Image (cartoon, helix red, strand yellow):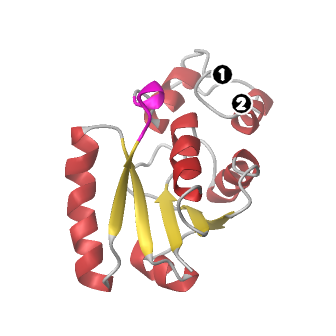
Amino acid sequence: MATALVPGSFNPVHLGHVRIVETVAATVERVVVAAVGNPNKPSELFDLDRRAQLLGESLAHLGNVEVVIGGPGLVVDLARRVGATVLVKGIRGVADLESESQMAHMNLAMAGIPTVFVPTSQEFAHLSSTLIREIWRLGGNVSAMVPAPVLRALAEMQEPPRS
């Protein structure tokens, strides 16, 4: 059985992420989506437990998808633990491809696990969790960018923290 691991910080999960997972879920038998910490992205909105919960709620319509919390450690170690045969990374454009390609080559060299790049749909190519956090913190409307569970979670927060 083919198992794809889709790792990411998902802080927060947005509609581009959901579309990528939907695409992957339509092509392999089992998809594991992992919320992982990223020391290069220190700006936290939700902790890992909450991100995993929101991912689960946002992807509940997909019967072959499960959500886990990754780490600490390497993504390839997580891939081995969940029995992944391939890693999947969403790509918005050339900059993503450049940075993700280096990681893909390293993961293949370290663990023999290939990475497949899935381009995001054009309708969501402008989305990034970083920009969504910034828009929300500045009081902007992100309702067309995030799934309903994330929108509810943001609404439950007292008010956007000002950066």
Q: Is residue 122 located in the magenta-colored stretch of the structure?
A: yes
Q: Nearer the viewer, residue 158 or 145?
A: 145
Q: Residue at x 76, y 27 (%)?
A: 155
Residue type marked 1: Ser
Q: Residue at x 42, y 72 (%)?
A: 86
Q: Is residue 110 left or right of residue 85?
A: left
Q: Is residue 148 left or right of residue 138?
A: right
Q: Residue 110 location in percent, x, y?
A: 27, 83
Circle 2 SS class: helix
Circle 1 SS class: loop
Disc on res. 143: 1
Q: Is residue 96 left or right of residue 153?
A: left
Q: Residue 62 location in percent, x, y?
A: 71, 54
In terms of sequence position, does the residue under pointer 2 or pointer 1 come before the other?
A: 1
Q: Residue 55 location in percent, x, y?
A: 67, 51
**Real-space CA distance between mark 2 and mark 1, rounded to the nearest whole angstrom:** 6 Å
Disc on res. 151: 2
